Image (cartoon, rainbow, N blue to C red):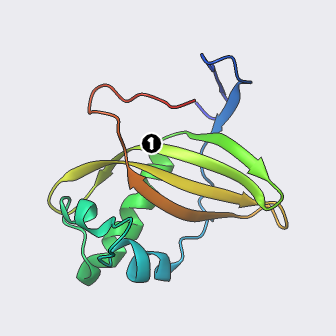
Amino acid sequence: MRGRQATALTGYPTRSAMRIPSDATIDDTKLTNYLLVERPWDDKSGYLRRAGFELKNWSDLRTAIRQLADDVDAIADLSNEYGTFYRVEGTLKGPTDSVQVVCIWMQRAANGRFHFVTLKPSTARRGNVSSTL
């Protein structure tokens, strides 16, 4: 399904769908110093723990994020002077369970390279994944 066009039902321009390239980077510190660390605000570690992701197995989270990016089309969301942001929604498969997430990736304007920005819990339910185009 690479290169297919996503149809926007909201009247906004259609957004193209693609796969995140295999050479896209995921910064280790994004996982070990942010996503898997309990925070007083915008904590994601508790949600990720539901699927079995913890600091001790942080590389499993990296693998699951990469697998999701390989399996699911990325939708171009918005662009600014820094680059284009892409959204990948789906099931993140952990060591003990799965959770629904939205992963945000960015293609840098400066060099065209992709890198992982963050993830958040998805509001979509299993079997009824909705898009927020």
Picture layout, residue 126 above or below residue 76: above
Q: How many marks?
A: 1
* Viewer-nearest residue: 41 or 69: 41
Residue 29, position in %: x, y? 48, 82
Name the kind of residue labelled 1 in the image: Glu
Residue drawn at (14%, 60%) of the image: 96
Visible in this render: residue 3? no
Picture layout, residue 14 above or below residue 58: above
- As helix, strand or loop, the secondary structure at mark 1 comes to strand
Please identify the quarter of the rendering in which residue 42 is found. Answer: bottom left
Q: Which residue is mark 1?
A: 89
For this view, does 13 lie left or right of residue 81? left
Picture layout, residue 32 above or below residue 23: below
Visible in this render: residue 63? yes
Q: Looking at the image, which residue sits at the far front?
A: 40
Residue 73, position in %: x, y? 54, 39
Q: Which quadrant: the N terminus?
A: top right
Residue drawn at (66%, 58%) of the image: 106
Q: Looking at the image, which residue sits at the far left?
A: 96
Q: Which quadrant: the C terminus?
A: top right
Picture layout, residue 116 above or below residue 78: below
Residue 115, position in %: x, y? 62, 65
Residue 60, position in %: x, y? 31, 70
* Viewer-nearest residue: 30 or 70: 30
Please identify the quarter of the rendering in which residue 59 is found. Answer: bottom left
Residue drawn at (56%, 46%) of the image: 87
